[in-house]
Image (tube, helix red, strand yellow):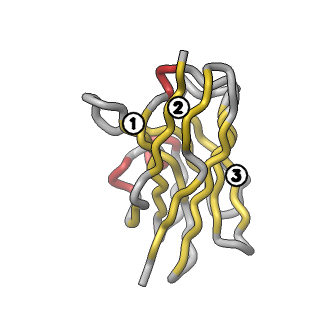
Amino acid sequence: QVQLVESGGGLVQAGGSLRLSCAASGRTFSAMGWFRQAPGKGPEFVAALSRSGASTYYAHFVKGRFTISRDNAKNTVYLQMNSLKPEDTAVYYCAAAAHEYYSGSDYSSSNSYDYWGQGTQVTVSS
């Protein structure tokens, strides 16, 4: 059974840092990414990377603050979040795809992903 389990969310003050983890089980994946959904808003792309980790993609609003990485030996993807802002408050979801992609638009589309985690809450206080 395929599972994606996120961890690392919590409450942090503005300017602080959190590191999210997503442990995958049941199979290995190619593209993996993070999306988020804030209250009253639709889901939005945050970051994604290729199987090798050589290609990374970020939403403009997290560039320079967030870093996505993966450890294929552990079948785990990470999201290091620095300089957090209150507007980063959301439920963060891990997503994984069976296929590799070759364009940023593919990586940033939720339709490109086959499996999703249950989400982890990130709350940034001002």
Q: Could you say where residue 33 lies in the image, as x and y percent from the top left?
A: 53, 51
Residue annotated with mark 3: 69
Label 2 amino acid? Ala
Q: Outermost residue toward the left?
A: 40
Determine whether the residue tagged by mark 3 lies in a helix, strand or loop: strand
Q: Residue at x 39, y 59 (%)?
A: 118
Determine whether the residue tagged by mark 1 lies in a helix, strand or loop: strand
User: Local crowd at mark 3 within 10 Å, few (<14), some, or many (≥20)?
Assistant: many
Label 1 amino acid? Glu
Determine whether the residue tagged by mark 2 lies in a helix, strand or loop: loop
Whether label 2 touches label 1, CB < 8 Å = yes
Nearest to N terminus: mark 2 or mark 3: 2
Rendered image quadrant of residue 115: bottom left
Q: Is residue 73 above or below residue 1?
A: above
User: As rendered, which of 67 and 7 lies closer to the eye?
Assistant: 7
Nearest to N terminus: mark 2 or mark 1: 1
Using the numbered discs, state the Cα–Cα distance from disc 2 to disc 1 in whole angstroms: 9 Å
Using the numbered discs, state the Cα–Cα distance from disc 1 to disc 3 in whole angstroms: 19 Å
Numbered circle sitting on residue 23: none
Q: Residue at x 42, y 52 (%)?
A: 119
Query: Which quarter of the image is occupied by the N terminus?
Result: bottom left
User: As rendered, which of 74 and 57 lies closer to the eye?
Assistant: 74
Residue annotated with mark 2: 59
Using the numbered discs, state the Cα–Cα distance from disc 2 to disc 3 in whole angstroms: 15 Å
Q: Residue at x 46, y 29 (%)?
A: 89
Label 3 amino acid? Ser
Residue annotated with mark 1: 44
Q: Is residue 122 left or right of residue 65?
A: left
Q: Is residue 20 above or below residue 124?
A: below
Q: Residue at x 63, y 27 (%)?
A: 63
Q: Could you say where residue 57 lies in the image, as x and y percent from the top left?
A: 59, 41
